[in-house]
Image (tube, helix red, strand yellow):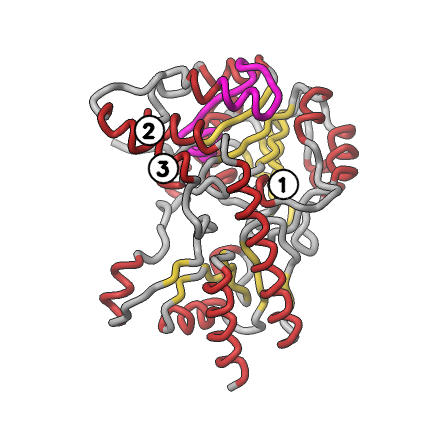
Amino acid sequence: MEAKQQLKSLTPYKPGKNVEDVKKELGLKKIVKLASNENPFGAPPAAKQAIEREMSQLAVYPDGYAAVLREKTARFVGTDRENLVFGDGSDEVIQMICRAYLTADSNTVMPTPTFPQYKHNAVVEGAEIREVPVRDGRHDFDKMAEAVDEKTKIVWLCMINNPSGEYIRDFELASFMGKLPSDVLVVCDEAYYEYVVAEDYPDTMSFLKKHPNLIITRTFSKAYGLAALRVGYGIAHPDVTAALESIRQPFNTSRIGQLAAAAALDDQDFIKECRDVNRKGLRLLYNFCDDFGLSYYPSQGNFILIDFNRSGDEVFEYLLKHGYIVRSGTALGYPTAVRITIGSEDQTKDIIECLSAWLKR
């Protein structure tokens, strides 16, 4: 038996270093993981309480319609319930989009480097991938528009681009949408939406009202601190969500995940506090970079990409030996950089101290 030919070009997802394994391997008592853009403060208290309440219901299937979460999310984002689709993280929503719209005789346009799952899922569907290099960490909208033709089904926009942290401006999205045919689906990936503070960041919900060919994806894995429970969602025109619902697995989000996410929406004070601490951490790292003459991209996410002018793997290994797991830029398209998640204030100060001692030597 032989699998799809295109799968031969793919490699399975390689997870980051396991904290406990690193402790044993290096003989360290403490490891700080700043590699996966997780929230260092975990989940809101209300979400934890919801999880505890549901522990007695583990034998019961989740609601396939996610009615409670659907109702609360619809009210929170200001849309109708039928405009939502839920997934096993926004990763699954991305997968559903590719499965619903891409075929072997179609193509899809995306920036590069960017979040790799756009390309990964498009390859699985056998579609042609048209990658447009970013400029200074930002989408090159002119070149992306030029790459679109009559066979283009999906254009991917990483609104806070991972790994650079740069963001799409309101005028850029407005201009770009005006250039595209109305039958091309535009995906606005807003995984880091809750961390944004830029005043010219687009109100994507208002764009959705004008452009029925747009879909917004968001997640509870980042700022809401529920990465382990895997809940994400898409917001789109009912025709789009209906197409995705037709291929969605019946119980793709867990009972605990649904109710924890619904409870988390009620605690926006928690989200604000996380956003404020994140900005403080970014400023500390900006100052560190300026002190040592290191290049970086200003970030609207909860991570920063820093160019150390040497192998990213070398920086990764140094930090690993000192108890910090970060992400080498080698696999991200930036071979002399590393991506560092913004941790707590103490974690940020500690990793800066560690890096400063090394750079001074």
State the image coordinates of residue 102 (x, y, percent, origin top left). Answer: 52, 26
Q: Does residue 228 appear left or right of residue 163 in this picture?
A: left
Indicate which disc residue 159 carries: 1
Query: Residue 172 falls in which quadrant of the image?
Result: top right
Crowding around mark 2 (Cα neighbors within 10 Å: few <14, some 14 to 19, many 20+) is many
State the image coordinates of residue 41 (x, y, percent, origin top left). Answer: 44, 50
Q: Earlier in the sequence, mark 1 or mark 2?
A: 1
Q: What residue appears at the point 29 percent right and 33 percent down from the top-left corner?
A: 52
Asked whether the beta carbons under mark 3 and mark 2 sit within 8 Å of each other, the answer is no
Does the segment drawn in magenta span residue 162? no
Residue that numbered label 3 is attached to = 48
Assign a secondary structure to mark 3. helix
Q: Does residue 56 appear left or right of residue 154 in this picture?
A: left
Residue that numbered label 2 is attached to = 256
- The magenta span reads 71-94
Which kind of residue does numbered mark 3 sit on? Lys
